[in-house]
Amino acid sequence: MVGADRNSRRGRARPAKAPRAPEQPPAPFVLRELAISPQAFHSRFGHTPILARKNGGMTLLGLDADQLLSTTRAVRKRLDLERPVPDELIRECVAMALQAPSGSNVVTMRFVVVRDEAKRQAVGQVYREVYAGYKASPYYPGRSTGDADRDRVQGRVASSADFLGDHMGDAPVLVLGCTAGPDRASAEAGLGNILPGMWSFMLAARARGLGTAWTSMHRARERDVAEILGIPYETVAQAVLTPLAYTKGTTFHPAERPDPNSVIHWDSW
Ligand SMILES: Cc1cc2nc3c(=O)[nH]c(=O)nc-3n(C[C@H](O)[C@H](O)[C@H](O)COP(=O)(O)O)c2cc1C
């Protein structure tokens, strides 16, 4: 029976109560949303989260999981191109991205964070040129489908995408989600590792009042972008390019999407 009653206090003398410490002032910040103290965050991620800063820090928007998932839009015209984005906020988004799954638990995701104006403009120019080709293609959403409702929605998407086509390089930060491997074939095979990480990055950004827009068409000129940014093309595959900026306003709405029943196949196709 040893141990069966291990936690019982019966028969044991209560330890004398320590005198009550004087009331402490409330902590200046609580990372409730992350369920982690600033100290624990620091020891785990190597820096104190900016959200925890008493002065000058920002707060999480306080969106619940479903709100975050349903209002993380591709932000283009509402990117604040003038306001700088602190590095530490970007590091937090990457910390959240790293919580995404990785095949064999080997982290191959990489993030190239471009703040340098000349490099942003150079990448932006590549994007502009690729975008011009897309605009002339049958895939451009601004083309009429004959369905007035659909055309209205797609017209808005096209106008928004056109804006990004012109202004990608003007965002205060560009983030390029990549995946690394021992050779080009392995790097490309690891794309599944960066995609969930990149979406987590975008969700984390939205939770912090930042906007992103998933793009991948620059990959038609991946070597050019690799050269601009010094990315080793043979071992690093680029997957997603996004602008990163504070959003103008923080209210975004769920988009119109198909009925779930139209995309679910229960038990068999
Ligand atoms: C694989 C993929 C590629 C995309 N490529 C581009 C792109 O090159 N340029 C762009 O402006 N948006 C791009 N988007 C964003 C979509 O246009 C956007 O998600 C879609 O219009 C729906 O808008 P929402 O995300 O705000 O609901 C891409 C999204 C995905 C998932």
Image (tube, rainbow, N blue to C red):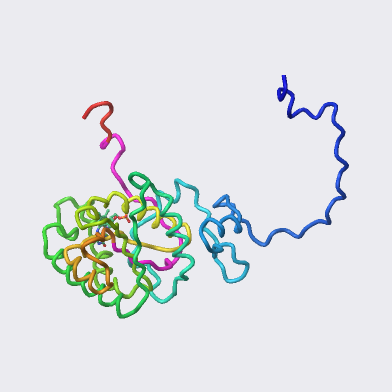
> Is residue 264 magenta-colored?
no
Residue 156 visible to the viewer: no
Residue extending furthest toward the front = 2
Residue 22: percent from left, percent from top: 83, 56
Between residue 239 and residue 67, name the one nearer to us: 239
Residue extending furthest toward the bottom = 118
Q: Quadrant of residue 202?
A: bottom left
Ligand 1 placement by image quarter:
bottom left
> Is residue 243 magenta-colored?
yes
Residue 223: percent from left, percent from top: 19, 68
From the image, which quarter does the N terminus lie in?
top right
Q: Quadrant of residue 72?
A: bottom left
Residue at screen point 15% across, 57% down: 139
Residue 266 visible to the viewer: yes
40 with respect to 191 (left or right): right
**Relative to residue 170, is residue 44 depicted above or below?**
above
Residue at screen point 17% across, 72% down: 129
**Relative to residue 248, is residue 100 depicted above or below?**
above
* Prevailing secondary structure class for the magenta stretch in the rendered image: loop
Between residue 191 and residue 3, name the one nearer to us: 3
Residue 242: percent from left, percent from top: 32, 64
Between residue 106 and residue 21, name the one nearer to us: 106
158 with respect to 251 (left or right): left
Residue extending furthest toward the top = 1
Residue at screen point 34% across, 44% down: 104
From the image, which quarter does the C terminus lie in?
top left
State the count of labels: 0
Q: Which residues are magenta?
A: 241-263
Residue 205: percent from left, percent from top: 43, 60
